Amino acid sequence: MNSLSLKKISKRYRIGNEEIEVFKEINIDIEEGEKIAVMGPSGAGKTTLLHIMGTILKPTEGKVFIDGIEVSSMDDESLASLRNEKIGFVFQFHHLLPEFTSLENVMMPLIIKGEKGAEERAKESLELVGLKGRENHRPSQLSGGERQRVAVARAIVGRPSILLADEPTGNLDWKTSEKLLSLLLKIHKKLSMTTVIVSHSRKVAEKCGKIYLLDRGKLTCCID
Ligand SMILES: Nc1ncnc2c1ncn2[C@@H]1O[C@H](COP(=O)(O)OP(=O)(O)O)[C@@H](O)[C@H]1O
Ligand SMILES: [Mg+2]
């Protein structure tokens, strides 16, 4: 079964009387456990595409399927619970809560869901990203790379079936980027969640194996 499918997805943004078409009739099928990279120039619509995949943005036209379920007919509440259950996000900026420690930030999604064993699971998740010993640090007390690791730990703590990362290494120096990417690949290997990594770095994308290019409104698979 496909983990994630987009069928004839179009997206237009309306600003005042003007409409901007970002892309038109995009199709993609991503199998369970597959990892892919999406590349494309700035402004091509990569973030828009990832947000549609993650159901935080609705397409103007077309259908999104997650584990075979068509999501566009779902109400906001069911959609939010499906998202909490199945999807983990890593954004370009870490979006950690500054007043909370690493451990508390990672526990947050589980607490919101009312799940048991949040602390234990958050500790495990931090260990998995190599941050054992940093549980009580606040974001401002961590390096940029470490903050992104906490963000990864938070994204995977609920064991989502799909991990979506939007230029997760975009604000890091090259060496730190390499390490973060290796971490994402290691996590993919260990937990085999379907993984989509948006990157404008060819070097990063090549490590994912399968590369899609989003440009001028079209999505094409360029390396398989
Ligand atoms: N909320 C929005 N309202 C209007 N236009 C938007 C909005 N978000 C993005 N855009 C426009 O859509 C296009 C694609 O943006 P984005 O998905 O952020 O591209 P990328 O991530 O590839 O840089 C850009 O031209 C951008 O200006
Ligand atoms: Mg973007």
Image (cartoon, rainbow, N blue to C red):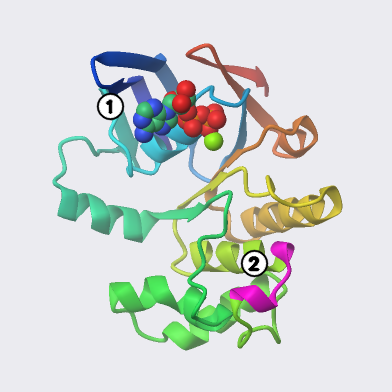
In this picture, is 60 found above or below 130?
Answer: above
Q: Nearer the viewer, mark 1 or mark 2?
A: 2
- Callout count: 2
User: Is 143 contained in the magenta span?
Assistant: yes
Q: Main secondary structure of the magenta part?
A: helix
Q: Is residue 4 left or right of residue 207?
A: left
Determine the residue located farthest toward the right in the rendered image: 175
Foreground residue, 165 or 173? 173
Which residues are drawn in magenta? 139-145
**x, y (%) of residue 128?**
66, 72
Q: Earlier in the sequence, mark 1 or mark 2?
A: 1
Residue picked out by circle 2: 147
**x, y (%) of residue 114?**
28, 78
- For the residues labelled 1 and 2, the Cα–Cα distance comes to 34 Å
User: Is 93 contained in the magenta span?
Assistant: no
For the question of whether residue 2 can be seen, the reply is: no
Q: Residue at x 73, y 51 (%)?
A: 181
In this picture, is 199 found above or below 131?
Answer: above
At mark 1, the secondary structure is: strand
Residue picked out by circle 1: 63
The residue type indicated by label 2 comes to: Arg
Report the image quarter containing ligand 2. Answer: top right
The residue type indicated by label 1 comes to: Lys
Q: Residue at x 70, y 74 (%)?
A: 142
- The answer to the question of whether label 1 and label 2 lie on touching residues, with beta carbons closer than 8 A, is no
For the question of whether residue 60 can be seen, the reply is: yes
